[in-house]
Image (cartoon, rainbow, N blue to C red):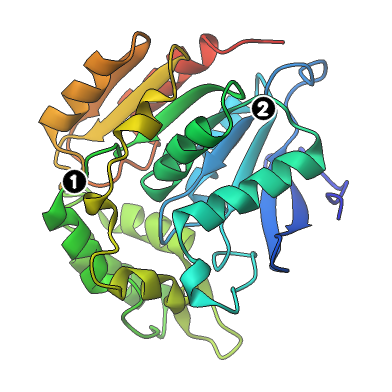
């Protein structure tokens, strides 16, 4: 199914919707930012959101990066405008890889770069390992081959829980209560922005999280978290491509030692710590944006 061709460049919307089908019949959605005229030869950048996130996570970064090349922001199954999966046990990284590979095939994309936040970074690592030679660069946002158990337990405790809120302000206060230690410098304006990226308004007028609560099902399976997997071989599959490792200074997911080892393992890996935030940086931060700009400048243009 092809993208809508109604890209608006009025300062409000500079992307088009694209829908495609997974191998098991789930209708999936992405936002496509076309890039400047004449940039079609450059490998596009795929933006891959975190576990409970959607395309709105990249609503500020994607148009910024698309000034130079095409950007595709994927919504994993069960998030945003992508349909819910019938089998909740398909909410796992290997299935997300298959879904993205289906998109690449449908779009005729051979080589590409990836910006992955948390879960999206794990998907990028698995794609580097399973699609050798096709990934030309990657940003791993507060994620790596070693994940901290404390952070994973925190995520497992809240993912899929909670009900709706009557107003956006109520929802923002609930989000602030849950995430104050992650973004200690946020004020109410910031919490509202984050809430509107992660929540939606139901037809009944309630504000709810914008994902299928069943994405938590695989996390409930004993011994099924990423902390028990050896992801270092997948990480090393990035080889010599430009690689940016972003770590939130307060992160409880990516330890400083693990991030340092990542930077030392590969020849073109660069580590940047984003001050004052935990898991994960929103990529709106000045330090994160500057680092991504420098990384993108090193990507191949043809």
Which residue does the image show at 25% across and 24% down from the upper left? 262
| Residue 138 visible within the image | yes
Residue 243: x %, y % from top left:
41, 20
Q: In which quarter of the image is residue 87?
A: bottom right
Vertical order, 34 against 210 (above or below): above
The reply, left or right, for residue 196 in relation to residue 141 is: right
Name of the residue lying farthest toward the bottom: 204
Looking at the rendered structure, the secondary structure element under dot 1 is: loop
Which residue position is annotated with label 1?
Answer: 185
Vertical order, 69 against 59 (above or below): above
Residue 102: x %, y % from top left:
71, 48
Disc 1 crowd rating (10 Å Cα; few below 14, some 14-19, many 20+) is few
| Residue 10 visible within the image | no
Which residue does the image show at 45% across and 16% down from the upper left? 295
Which residue position is annotated with label 2?
Answer: 44
Looking at the rendered structure, the secondary structure element under dot 2 is: loop
Q: Residue 177 versus residue 29: which sits nearer the camera?
A: 29
The reply, left or right, for residue 73 in relation to residue 168 is: right
The reply, left or right, for residue 237 in relation to residue 263 is: right
Disc 2 crowd rating (10 Å Cα; few below 14, some 14-19, many 20+) is many
């Amino acid at each position: 199914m092809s993208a809508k061709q109604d890209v608006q460049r009025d300062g409000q919307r500079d992307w088009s919707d694209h829908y495609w089908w997974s191998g098991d019949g789930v209708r999936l959605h992405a936002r496509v930012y076309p890039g400047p005229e004449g940039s079609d030869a450059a490998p596009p950048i795929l933006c891959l959101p975190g576990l409970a996130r959607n395309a709105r996570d990249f609503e500020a970064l994607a148009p910024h990066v698309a000034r130079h090349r095409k950007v595709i922001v994927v919504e994993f199954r069960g998030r945003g405008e992508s349909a819910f999966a019938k089998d909740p046990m398909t909410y796992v990284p290997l299935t997300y890889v298959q879904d993205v590979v289906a998109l690449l095939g449908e779009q005729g994309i051979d080589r590409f770069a990836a910006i992955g936040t948390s879960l999206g970074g794990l998907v990028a690592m698995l794609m580097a390992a399973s699609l050798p030679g096709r990934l030309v660069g990657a940003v791993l946002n507060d994620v790596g081959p070693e994940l901290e158990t404390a952070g994973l337990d925190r995520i497992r405790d809240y993912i899929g829980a909670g009900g709706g809120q009557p107003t956006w302000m109520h929802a923002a206060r609930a989000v602030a209560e849950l995430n104050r230690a992650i973004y200690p410098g946020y004020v109410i304006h910031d919490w509202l922005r984050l809430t509107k990226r992660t929540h939606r308004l139901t037809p009944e007028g309630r504000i709810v999280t914008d994902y299928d609560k069943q994405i938590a099902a695989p996390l409930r399976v004993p011994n099924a978290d990423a902390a028990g997997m050896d992801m270092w071989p997948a990480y090393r599959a990035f080889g010599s491509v430009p690689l940016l490792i972003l770590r939130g200074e307060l992160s409880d997911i990516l330890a400083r030692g693990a991030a340092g080892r990542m930077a030392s393992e590969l020849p073109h890996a660069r580590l940047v710590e984003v001050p004052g935030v935990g898991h994960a940086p929103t990529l709106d931060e000045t330090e994160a944006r500057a680092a991504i700009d420098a990384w993108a400048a090193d990507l191949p243009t043809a």
